[in-house]
Structures are given as structure tokens and as C-alpha cells.
Amino acid sequence: MIDRITKLYQDSGLLLFCVRIPLRFIKVLFDILNTLFYKAVCKKVGKNVRIEFGARIESPKLVRIGDGVFIGKGTLLVSENNTGECIIEDKVHICRDCHIDHTGGLTIGNNTLLSEGVVIYSHSHGYDPKSKPVSIKKEIAANCWLGTRAILLETAESIAEKTIIASAAVVSKSIIEKQCIFGGVPAKRIKQYND
């Protein structure tokens, strides 16, 4: 902690340092308060969870969050008809400004990373935007990485373990091959990789 404060001082000078330190403490305080609020209202929230101020969970009684999870500001967890459960397993990292729909039910596996601006849908209206949403269960397996602004359409019901989805890819089908990289619009297999 002292090293971080020293580096901040060296990088910004005395004037900016005097402005940034109080702002950082205020941000941390609001993050703690936001996390405590969601711990009180969500179905379950594990240990060492951080939910940044500005992240919103619309149906908290349907959300279970595992240990060591981070949810960035601007992220929205929403269920259009307040039905589908959202299960976020341990050590999931959800960056800022993600839109996660769990109308049909959603499970995000351990150690998965959702980069900034990822969009996930778990329901469909078919061809009538005013129709009642049709729930579609979705599962993202463990150790996946969804790149910046990747979109998982409702028709992509499952994502296999250790899948990497490239930035701005649109996934329209389930991915059943493990340890593969997918990218493009619509997303196609680019290659398989080894650990």
C-alpha cells in the first residue's frame, strides 16, 4: 500500500497527489458501501467480493455471487421478467460497463473474465419486440475470457471451458470445443490452443 502511495506521489507531483489521495479514499469508501448493500440484499455473496459503486443488480434476490468476485462500475445485471437465477462462481472478474441479462438463467464459471463492455443475453422476443420474453438458459464454463465488447446472443446457450472470445465478436451459436479462440461476426473458430 505504501509503495502504491509513493508511486502515485512520484508520478503526479505534490498538487495532484493532494487531490488524488482523498478522491481515491472516497472511491474505496463508496465501493465498500455498495458491496455491503448488495451483500445484504442478494441471495448470496461470498467472501472478498468487490462491487464497485455504479454497478447495478436489478433483481438481487435472484443473484448468487461466489468468493473473490469483482464487478466493475457501470455493469448491469438484469432479468427482464424477474425469473432467471444468476450464478457467478468464484474468482469471476467482470469489468466495467457490462450488460448481463439473466432472464433465462445464467451461470458464469470459476475464474472467468468478462472484459469491458461485454453483453450477454439469455432471452428472446422472436420477431416481435413487444412479445413476452422467451427464457433461454445460458452457461459459461470455467476459465473463459470474453474480450472487450464481445456479445453473446441468446442462441449461444453454452460456452465451453477455457474458451477465448475475441474483442467485438458476436457469438450466435453454442461453443462446445474446449481451449479454442473464437472471433468475428458471427464468431467462428480461429484456432485451438494449449496451456
Image: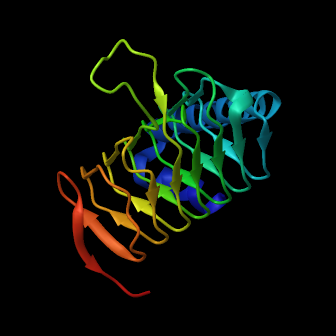
Give the residue at the far top of this rendering: 130
Give the percent coordinates (x, y) of residue 176. 41, 68
Residue in front for this viewpoint, 32 or 79: 79
Tell me the residue at 53%/44% (across/down).
137
Give the residue at the far left of this rendering: 185
Which image quadrant for residue 38? top right
Give the percent coordinates (x, y) of residue 3. 60, 63
Residue in front for this viewpoint, 157 or 20: 157
Give the residue at the far bottom of this rendering: 194
Residue in front for this viewpoint, 12 or 114: 114
Give the percent coordinates (x, y) of residue 172. 29, 49
Give the percent coordinates (x, y) of residue 167. 27, 55
Tell me the residue at 75%/52% (across/down).
48
Q: Quadrant of the C terminus?
A: bottom left
Q: Say left or right for 151 vs 1.
A: left
**Can you say whether 9 is above or below 54 in the image?**
below
**Can you say whether 92 is above or below 153 in the image?**
below
How many marks overall?
0
**Can you say whether 137 is above or below 126 in the image?**
below
Q: Quadrant of the N terminus?
A: bottom right
Tell me the residue at 39%/46% (across/down).
116
Which image quadrant for residue 175? bottom left
